[in-house]
Amino acid sequence: MQPDGSLTNQLLIAMPGMLDPNFSTTVTLVCEHNNDGALGIVINRPTTLKLGGLFEQLSVDDADPDTASSPVLSGGPVGTERGFVLHGPEHTYENTLAVSDDICLTLSRDVIDAMATGDGPEQTLVAIGYAGWEAGQLEEEMLANSWLSVPATREIVFDTPFADRWDFAARTLGIDIACIAPDAGHA
């Protein structure tokens, strides 16, 4: 957590007792957190949709085959008609938000067009939908032990296999998440 209490650039690791099926065993990158609420992208829920399918829906022709074979993630249950691209800071686009010095979030189509031609960012993660919290909601969930948080790293966001991210992120805290009881309390 940042000195101002913001969880921006933190990974939220769903606790084993998380009952909401949208977030059970997820890792969510908090891209923005302020007094108005928070926005995050779930980074470990690949869908059956590949980028090539997204390119087709957007009428992008002659897409780079390597890029087209990349999976699209389910970024969360809100705004599932919208696309979000997490990427490194090497490029910025029309609507890019710096999450950290290492990770950016772009909401505009120009990043998708650049990716399709092979001119996009070196590391990307494309998601449909996002996780959203109203003012104070995420803070309440943290106090209720719904989430663990760790600083985000490019390694976890871009390099760790999707299936390993929940466990790997928890292990950065020295925790074997599979050994945590689903019901947590306060001391």
Image (spheres, rainbow, N blue to C red):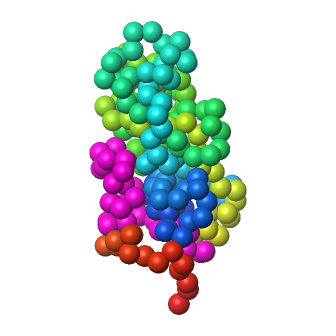
Magenta residues, start to end: 143-172
Report the residue at 62% width, 37% height from top: 80
Q: Is residue 124 visible?
A: yes
Q: Position of residue 133 (x, y in %)?
A: 65, 55
How many numbered markers are drawn? 0
Is 150 above or below relative to 73?
A: below
Q: Is residue 10 visible?
A: no
- Residue 90 magenta-drawn? no
**Horizontal relation, residue 157 to residue 138: left or right:** left
Q: Nearer the viewer, residue 43 or 88?
A: 43
- Residue 144 magenta-drawn? yes
Is 167 above or below relative to 184?
A: above
Report the residue at 37% width, 30% height from top: 70
Q: Residue furthest top?
A: 61
Is 82 above or below relative to 168?
A: above
Report the residue at 31% width, 31% height from top: 122
Is 3 above or below relative to 47?
A: below
Q: Residue furthest bottom?
A: 187
Q: Position of residue 109 (x, y in %)?
A: 53, 23
Report the residue at 63% width, 32% height from top: 81
Q: Position of residue 59 (x, y in %)?
A: 53, 12
Q: Position of residue 37 (x, y in %)?
A: 66, 56
Q: Examine the image and state in which quarter residue 116 appears.
A: top left
